[in-house]
Image (cartoon, helix red, strand yellow):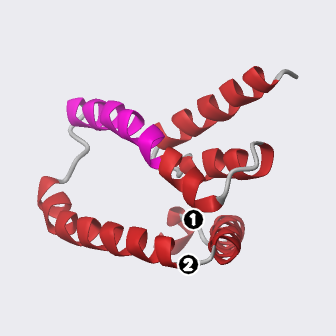
Amino acid sequence: MTEGLIAFLASLAAGLLSALGLGGGGILVLYLTLVQGMDQAQAGGINLLFFLPAAAVAVVLHLRRGRIDWKMALRCLPFGVLFALLGSWLAHLMDGMLLSKGFAVLVLLMGLRELLGKSREQRKR
């Protein structure tokens, strides 16, 4: 496969998963670090830029379907902004290899939780 096709497929998968709220940015960061050889901080920055239009489209679609709980969103917003700033500051202080390994552990833990965790239906029983 050509490099352009791989980039297209990685971006397509990341965009689709982001629109579904499933963390498609993880795929994009993995692609940028493993295939393109970028460091973790640079890949994270590109991921944030990629996320903005994908999030805007997803918000519009969810607004049309009435799927946004504004009361909860407004309660979470200040903390999201605060911790995004804190996380960005910490990422710049950390060694790139440590940041990369931390991201790998996070992705692994999330995958294990999805594989081994109970579904909503199982918890209701």
- Magenta span includes 58: yes
Q: For residue 104, which numbered disc appears in the image?
A: none
Q: Is residue 107 visible?
A: yes
Q: Say which quadrant the N terminus sits in.
A: top right
- In depth, the one of 50 and 59 nearer the eye is 50
User: Residue, x 34% and y 30% (percent of image)?
Assistant: 57
Q: Quadrant of residue 85?
A: bottom left
Q: Position of residue 117 (x, y in %)?
A: 63, 72
Say the numbered circle drawn on residue 94.
Answer: 2
**Label 2, residues with CA under 10 Å away: few <14, some 14-19, many ≥20:** few
Disc 1 to disc 2, C-alpha distance: 35 Å
Which residue type carries mark 1? Ser
Q: Describe residue 59's horizontal placement relative to residue 33 as left or right.
A: left
Image side of residue 52 versus residue 98, left or right: left
Report the side of 55 relative to 109 (left or right): left
User: Which label belongs to residue 119?
Assistant: 1
Determine the residue positioned at 51% across, 47% down: 47
Quick one: 113 or 54, which is closer to the camera? 54
The stretch in magenta equals: 48-64
Q: How many marks?
A: 2
Location of residue 118 with respect to 35 vertically, above or below: below
Please say if 23 is above or below 36: below
